[in-house]
Image: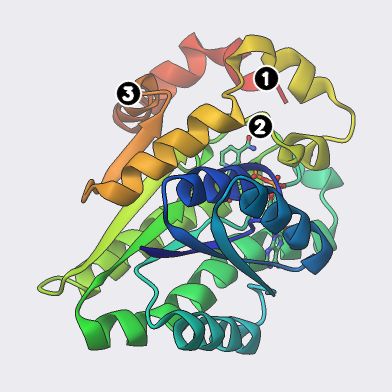
Amino acid sequence: MNIVITGASSGLGAETAALLAAEGHRVILGSRSIQKLKEVKKRIQSEGGSCEVYALDVTNEQSCVQFMKQAEENNGSVDILINNAGAGTFKKIEELQAVEVEEMLSVNVTGVHNMTKAALPYMKARDQGKLLFISSLAGKIPSPKASVYAASKHAVIGYARAVRMELAGTNVNVSIFYPGPIDTPFLDKADKTGNYRSRLGRMMLTVRETAVAVGKLTEKKSRESHLPKVGFLLSVLYQTAPKIVEKAAGKQFQKK
Ligand SMILES: NC(=O)c1ccc[n+]([C@@H]2O[C@H](COP(=O)([O-])OP(=O)(O)OC[C@H]3O[C@@H](n4cnc5c(N)ncnc54)[C@H](OP(=O)(O)O)[C@@H]3O)[C@@H](O)[C@H]2O)c1
């Protein structure tokens, strides 16, 4: 299959690309840093995989349109779009800078819409395809210092579910993935003090196990998937009784 992955120059996107390419898929990768993308491509090709890379800024609608056009024209079709590009800053509300807020909303929300909008006409015309949205457990369970990040990942859920409803009756499938904290450069950018990373300790998912879960989701028609699996139960509990969970797990919410 031909699989587009946004935000593939680092972390989960890069690891998922390597894994899917090793399984025989052709991966088409985009992010702003073409230099970093070329390094990912080198790794994939050295492992015998098939890969192409293009510069992409998901916050720019025209960049997304151009990216999808190239991906479609050079490969015949794109079977799966993985909306993975993301940004986060973990700070108290009074400390968040306007530029940080703008980055989280434009990459995590507008960017997801721009790429989905750019990919959909091709998938709908063929009546085939899959959209995979990388949300976060933060999209279901918010926490202090992650107000805007959590809001942006909650937005991904609302957006993806609405897309799914718009696509009812077609063969274009929508899946949403909710991972907990993953050991990627994301954590160092989100909290420059390093406190969050050190407090997480063994609670962090490895990037490999997370990529494996994303890989599995590309093969299935599952609506939603959580990692770790207990994230599902925790999120149901939180949606059902937020007051009780916030009281009972008070300290667990203070890791950032
Ligand atoms: N790490 C975690 O703890 C965690 C937990 C749950 C969910 N997630 C989600 O998982 C996804 C991947 O995160 P990660 O941990 O792999 O983070 P990461 O290592 O920081 O990678 C983020 C990727 O997004 C790309 N990106 C940022 N802005 C972009 C833009 N405007 N246009 C195109 N690409 C852009 C970056 O590439 P360039 O800089 O080259 O553009 C980079 O490749 C994100 O959606 C994140 O919210 C992460």
Residue 225, image quadrant? top left
Ligand 1 within 8 Å of disc 3? The answer is: no
Q: Return the x and y of residue 230 as percentages of the image width and height.
A: 36, 19
Residue 76 visible somewhere in the drawing: yes
- Marks 1 and 3 in Cβ contact (< 8 Å): no
Label 1: which residue? 254
Pointer 3 local density, CA inside 10 Å: few below 14, some 14–19, many at least 20: some
- Marks 2 and 3 in Cβ contact (< 8 Å): no
Q: Is residue 116 left or right of residue 104?
A: left
Sequence-earlier tag: 1 or 3: 3
Residue type pointed to by label 1: Gln
Q: Return the x and y of residue 111 as percentages of the image width and height.
A: 58, 70
Residue 79, image quadrant? bottom left
Pointer 1 local density, CA inside 10 Å: few below 14, some 14–19, many at least 20: few
Q: Is residue 202 left or right of residue 195?
A: left
Q: How many marks?
A: 3
Q: Please report the residue visible at 70 percent of the width from the left and 35 percent of the height from the top.
A: 184
Label 2: which residue? 144
Relative to 251, say whether 118 is above or below.
below
Spatial CA distance of label 2 from label 1 is 7 Å
Residue 80, image quadrant? bottom left
Q: Please report the residue visible at 45 percent of the width from the left and 83 percent of the height from the top.
A: 72
Residue 140 visible somewhere in the drawing: no
Residue type pointed to by label 2: Pro
Spatial CA distance of label 1 from label 3 is 18 Å
Query: In the rendering, which numbered label is found on residue 237?
Result: 3
